[in-house]
Image: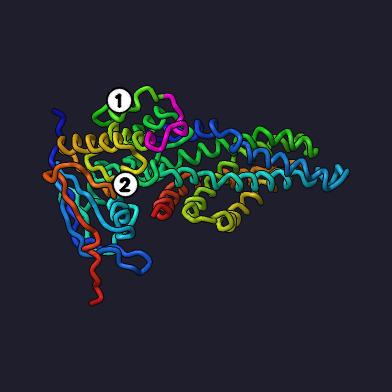
Amino acid sequence: MIAAFFAVIRRDLLLAFRRRAEMANPLFFFVLVVTLFPLAVGAQPHLLQEMAPGVIWVSALLAALLSLDGMFRSDFEDGSLEQMLLSSQPLAILVLGKIIAHWLVTGLPLLLAAPLLAMFLGLPEQAMGTLWLTLILATPLLSLIGAIGVALTVGLRRGGMILSLLVLPLYVPVLIFASSAVGRAAEGLPVSAQLNILLAMLLAAMVLVPLPTSIALKMSVN
Amino acid sequence: MYKLQHNELAVNKLACSRDDRLLFSGLSFSLQSGEMLLLEGSNGSGKTSLLRILCGFREADAGEITWNNQAHADSHFFEDMAYIGHADGVKKELTVLENLRFALALSKPGQYSIDQALAKVQLAGFDDNAVQTLSAGQKRRLSLARLLVTHNILWILDEPFTSLDKQGIELIETLMLTHVTQGGMVILTSHHDLSLSTRVLKRIHLDTFQVDTWQ
């Protein structure tokens, strides 16, 4: 079971490596959106500084949304998903492996790019640590929550719009807590409440997501 | 010689409809170790649907499926079967070896090692080729190699002969025959007529089960 779990992660990382160009898209999008803001807003450093947590978090969220559809799409199309459903290993474990691999490929790069972009927008240094923490806690959450939506829509030919409609409302609490934590940290206020809630949401999602996702995948393959 | 223990698949009064159209109903058959079943029927007669019901991807509208006298969902059925559908179920960016290793990680090891299986499907030496560089027929044979490296008793094959040349077809027929003589079972659909003896081969014509139940 553990071996199968790691085999899934290994396979998906290998696949991501072989399709590097495609996989860099969300990161590219993230960087692009954040860098466009100063150009559009103009030379108003204070305004940018105030908007920084929101801008970074909205861009991260949209980048995650952009990457979601790829989570099960290619497996669905080439029949690999059917093979996973027929595997003697529990599907929920394989699904969790796929979600973790998805986060490693799409969430982790955002984590590495974010401090640079935060500096670029003039986010106060005291908020950097909190920004990192919110990203560490909440980007896996985005992959987890998204997985249910993708599993439900992977069988639809034009599932993209429905996917956004399904997933965005569930992303809103993550966005609110994460950006408010960064905003408060920038003003020097305590942020433990927000971080704790994000942590609780992450732990709950890790337990609650794999099973419904695997059921939704079974429905989609039908 | 390698021999599997006796197994039995029984299908009792199965019915399947799609978009309010009855594909087949009252379909019953049983399959023992060492037997092969060829599903025939015109396009849209429900051959693929039947296979997908057996795989648990679809639900039947009526009827039951048993594996060794147990309802197939509660038995070891899903550990004992392997399916190859229209899609090969291999990743085109990965190499032949990586694909087979992953298949092995998802299931119990079978009778052959990866090298033996590749030799059997005449793909020896292609280990490190990415699947996207293989021809369609070679991809088919790779998906068959997956059947050989993993543990399975019942093979469910949907149109296994598509995109294969004459030697490829003979190769699959030989593999299927070896599998059933070892006590395995095969259910397949094909438009291509099999050249195998009728002793091991059962045939079901799905069009004959397209009875109108409204009467």
User: In screen coordinates, is A25 left or right of B208?
Assistant: right
Is the residue marked by circle 1 packed among few (<14), some (14-19), or many (20+) residues within 10 Å?
A: some
Instruction: Assign a secondary structure to mark 2.
Output: loop
Residue A139 screen position, x and y as percent: 59, 42
Query: Can residue A210 be seen from the camera position used here?
Result: yes
Given the image, what chain letter belongs to the residue carrying mark 2? Answer: B
Magenta span contains residue B130: yes
Given the image, what chain letter belongs to the residue carrying mark 1? Answer: B
Residue B44 screen position, x and y as percent: 33, 60
Which residue shows up at 79% across the image and 45% down it? Answer: A37
Q: Could you tell me how far apart the alpha carbons at marks 2 and 1 are, in whole angstroms?
A: 23 Å
Q: Quadrant of residue B87?
A: top left
User: In screen coordinates, is B84 left or right of A198?
Assistant: left
Magenta segment boundaries in residue numbering:
B128-139
Residue B77 screen position, x and y as percent: 24, 46
Query: Can residue B7 be seen from the camera position used here?
Result: no
Magenta span contains residue B142: no
Which image quarter holds the N terminus of chain A?
A: top left
Residue identifier under label 1: B119
Q: Earlier in the sequence, mark 2 or mark 1?
A: 1
- Report the residue that reaches farthest toward the front: B166
Which amino acid type is shown beneath numbered disc 2?
A: Glu
Residue identifier under label 2: B159
**How many marks overall?**
2
Which image quarter holds the C terminus of chain A?
A: bottom left
